[in-house]
Amino acid sequence: MAKMSIAEALREAIREEMRRDERVFCLGEDIDIPGGFGGAFTVTLGLSKEFGHERILDTPISEIMIAGAAVGAAMTGMIPIADVQYGDFLFCMMDQLADNAAKMTYMSGGTVSVPMVMRAPVGATTRGAQHAQSLESFFTHVPGLKIICPSTAYDAKGLLKTAIRDKNPVVVFEHKLLYGSKGNRAEKSALSPVGEVPEEEYLIPFGEGVIRREGTDITIVANLLMVYRAMEAAEILEKEGISVEVIDPRTLVPFDYELVLSSIKKTSRLMIVEEDTRRNGWGAEVAAQIAEDGLYYLDAPIIRVATYDVPIPFAPVMENFVVPSAARIAEAARKLMKA
Amino acid sequence: MKTENELVLSKADKNKAAARLLEMYEQMFLLRSYEEKIYFLFLEGVMPGTIHQSQGQEACAVGMLFDLRKEDYMTSTHRPAGHCLAKGVSLDSMMAEMFAKSTGCCKGKGGAMHTGDISVGAIPAIAITAGGMPVAVGVGLSCKMRRTDNVVVCFFGDGASNEGAFHEAMNAAAIWKLPVVFVCENNFYGASTHIKLVTNIENIADRASAYGMPGEVVEGNDVELVNEAATRAIARARKGEGPTIIELKTYRRCGHSRNDACAYRDKVEEKEWYAKDPLIISKNRILEEKYATAEELEQIEKRVLQRIEDAVEYAKNSPDPKPEDALEHVYAV
């Protein structure tokens, strides 16, 4: 076992897969320029030393091209891992992802596959509205894409390796405050979770969530940074006699509904916490699906705690207000217990 | 005085040129007849969907793709029928796709605008204007990274040249010296809008210098001229010397899509271009050079028309997809 940050775990996953399969390569902006950053959050730092700049390909600032080139390379025998510095830039390449990556297999009657990975950092980090958004719900809506969101180093490595071996386009959402990036790329308010990562190879299948904390009164489903906020809230609530079970779905498409259903059979209360804005979010979809399949297990309405429906503001005092905090989650839980 | 040997060689060359032009003519006639057949079937209401046809632009597809290998690639647009036939997608599977049958090249899931068959290097057509250009960059990157000498021919229209994707694709292909041949079929109209209204320069290919790559403007209705330009650009790409822009000046004999009487086009302009029809140019040359007789050409045309009738029969007799087939192929397994 080695102790690793998420940035290091992602880097290890890329390194191992590039060693295993020469079709795998990385492309993106500033991903390993000598003297540069190794990607905005150091994930690809130093990989060109082993694999050269042909396989760790620094691109022009051309998001449409990055995504389109990934699609074209993936269709013709390569396995690209594309990268954007901030998730918000995915909007620049939306046509390539939603119209080409996601639809090519289907439109061709299954004769084409697009085995590509699109990595994107999300989360509010006092950079203002255009480097802050959590974009999961834009992409969970698109048939043909798979969506994953690792929140620990162990999951980051195992899920990314699975993504690289998947025959379909996989969008990986990574949280800026969870990378544990070092040096001048470290985030001020980062949690920097360092986790145990086995030396031996392992893969984590998509569609299998995990219980981060067992409890009996309320089930909270949360992803990325919100897993940690929910855990913090659970600590607070435990002192008040409220026992919270925290589920991290780890992948949003496919989604582990079985795990949530089995949890609410025990707790009979469900809360969904997401950093994505609330309206039409993935949390709304989970709530609707659980209402269809598990309404009679519930003793109270399903509630969502999400970022308010505003662009992310800059001032830390406002940013902290709009993004769910442990205190806000705990308060919602208290209300839910009385419902 | 030429030696006997040289005379034999030049005769061999002439035979070769004759054989090539006859084959190109046959292909162009196939493209034209296929689309005319589709047009009538569409008017009869036999076919679902819409149509974006390329009658008049056959020399572009055939001249560019004539010397490609099966392992080479081609990306196309919302107007892909000619490109696909010229790249070797089977006539039967294309016709069946138009009839929305399960034997179609996309199993009835793609339709006219996504025609293609990756097994012959025809990337399923991308119908978002300029959307295929960054994809062609990726295909070129893949050809290069896999250490092949394969190339990709990337078709786009004059309208695509003002998309951001055009710029990003051109620049990337140039800096990485990718084996991409960018082919602008300039038919002067993006749907109903004349290129002069939306572009300040005469030739799209003039933009090549901005990317540090060669650009060439070619009479796009002369299949031999198109093929000569293609030969130069493909050779350059195969040698790893990078991309080229070839601009083919051409003209649609048809509307942009269904029910388009082209009221936005000048009738004199139309007449002039119709006189420069690519099939007429080639046919005249074949007869002038005595590559074949009029009767021999008629035989070729008859053969092609029979193939099209057979394809229609094949498509009509093919099974419909099951409605629930719609739920398959969302993900590759």
Image (cartoon, coloured by chain):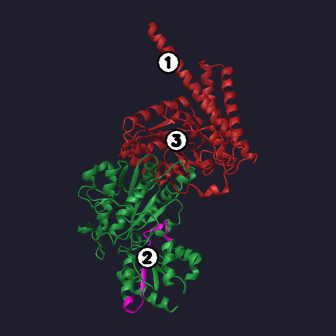
Chain colours: A green, B red
- Amino acid carrying label 2: it is Ile
Residue under circle 3? B119
Q: Residues within 10 Å of mark 1 (few under 14, many from 20)?
A: few
The residue marked by circle 3 belongs to what chain? B
Range covered by the magenta-colored residues: A237-256
Read off the residue under disc 1: B13
* Mark 3 Cα-neighbour bin, 10 Å: few <14, some 14–19, many ≥20: some
x, y percent for residue A221: 45, 77
Residue, x 49% and y 37% (percent of image)? B217
Q: Nearer the viewer, residue B305 or A179?
A: A179
How packed is label 2: few (under 14 Cα within 10 Å), some, or many (20 or more)?
many
Question: What type is the residue that disc 1 sits on?
Answer: Asp
Is A45 on the left or on the right of B301, as rendered?
left
Where's residue B49, x and y in %? 67, 51
Residues indicated by labels 3 and 1 sit on the same polypeptide chain = yes
Q: Position of residue A203 (x, y in %)?
A: 38, 61
Give, as a three-letter code, the residue at label 3.
Answer: Ser
Q: Residue at x 58, y 75 (%)?
A: A293
Say if the magenta span includes residue A240.
yes
Q: Which residue is mark 2?
A: A247
Frontmost of labels 1 and 2 is 2
**In this view of the protein, which residue sits in the foreground, A140 or A248?**
A248
In the rendered image, residues at marks 2 and 3 fall on the same chain:
no
